[in-house]
Amino acid sequence: MFDLNRIKAELLYEKGLLKKITKQIARLPKTKLYAFDKKGIIYFRAYKDGKVKYLGTEGNPGIKAAQKRYLAEQIISRLNNNIALMDNFINNYQEFNPVAFLDQLPVAYKKPDDQILVDLGFLPGPNKMSSSHNDSYYPENLVHKTISGITVRSRVEAIIADFYTSLGIVFSYEERLIFKDGTSIRPDFTIRDNLGNIIVIHEHIGMVGDEKYWESFIWKLRLYLDNDYIPGNTLLFTYDSINQSIDTSLLKNNIIYHLKKNNVI
């Protein structure tokens, strides 16, 4: 999402700079400076009130004052232009939040099919998430049945789901989580309290040795961090090994530790 606050901060900075430079230019002479080269040496003349004054070479205070005024005039011109543009932009910009945008639509359009949202860029599609670890846009990949009756994408996810069930913990699988900027993601497992608040998000990272899969994990991690979901607190990550094997005892111990830390059990 576009960060309007950055534009507002830049506007304040440039207005402050304009005020500072405007004060300085009032003390500088209105002199027009010309330079010419003579045998490799630059000489300067100043024109003021129809009169010409020879200033010699660099180092003359009059040269520096004239250069400073010219630069100040150019900067003031640029700042005035930028400030006018930013003021107009801020006054007319309408922030686009996909969640709020959909909510304002007529009832018939509020909840379109996921694929429509992917096509229009509301939701991340296969280009951001690898096909082996995607959200429920591909239900045909949900082939591993669990004891609770749901189907998941991998054998390890089935083990995790069955372990949660054995502990008597209610969870949702690939429930859509919409962040404040409208970005959407589907965590592997989401556990909520009785009031519906998220207390644990569990992502299992398989195919660790696959470069594209690892890129999708990095994308997910950044998205979580940007929205204040911190690994070790609300967020639990478990992993396959490089050869895609899994130590189920270690996996379950990690889950138990995290659940106890968050007072789930």
Image (cartoon, rainbow, N blue to C red):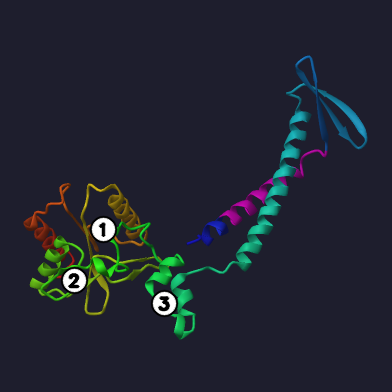
Badge 1 amino acid: Ser
Residue under the point 22% across and 50% down: 208
Drawn side of residue 16 relative to residue 69, left or right: left
Q: Using the numbered discs, state the Cα–Cα distance from disc 2 to disc 1 in whole angstroms.
A: 15 Å
Q: Position of residue 172 (x, y in %)?
A: 22, 73
Q: Nearer the viewer, residue 109 or 188?
A: 109
Q: Position of residue 46 (x, y in %)?
A: 84, 30
Q: Secondary structure at mark 3?
A: loop
Q: Secondary structure at mark 2?
A: strand
- N-term-proximal mark, 1 vs 3: 3
Image: 146 above or below 233: below
Task: State yes or no: discs 1 and 3 in contact (Cβ < 8 Å).
Answer: no
- N-term-proximal mark, 2 vs 3: 3
Q: Inspect this view and state whether residue 122 appears.
A: no
Q: Within 10 Å of the Cα at label 1, are there few (<14), some (14-19), or many (20+) other Cα atoms?
A: some
Drawn side of residue 89 relative to residue 165, left or right: right
Provide the residue designation for mark 2: 151
Q: In the figure, residue 162 lies in which quadrant?
A: bottom left
Badge 3 amino acid: Pro
- N-term-proximal mark, 2 vs 1: 1
The label number, if any, that marks residue 50 in the structure image: none
The label number, if any, that marks residue 132 in the structure image: 1
Provide the residue designation for mark 3: 112
Q: Give the farthest residue toward the top.
A: 39
Q: Position of residue 39 (x, y in %)?
A: 78, 14
Drawn side of residue 46 relative to residue 118, left or right: right
Q: Give the farthest residue toward the front.
A: 140
**In the rendered image, which quarter contains the C terminus?**
bottom left
Q: Within 10 Å of the Cα at label 2, are there few (<14), some (14-19), or many (20+) other Cα atoms?
A: some
Q: Using the numbered discs, state the Cα–Cα distance from disc 2 to disc 3 in whole angstroms.
A: 24 Å
Drawn side of residue 39 relative to residue 110, left or right: right
Q: Using the numbered discs, state the Cα–Cα distance from disc 1 to disc 3 in whole angstroms.
A: 25 Å
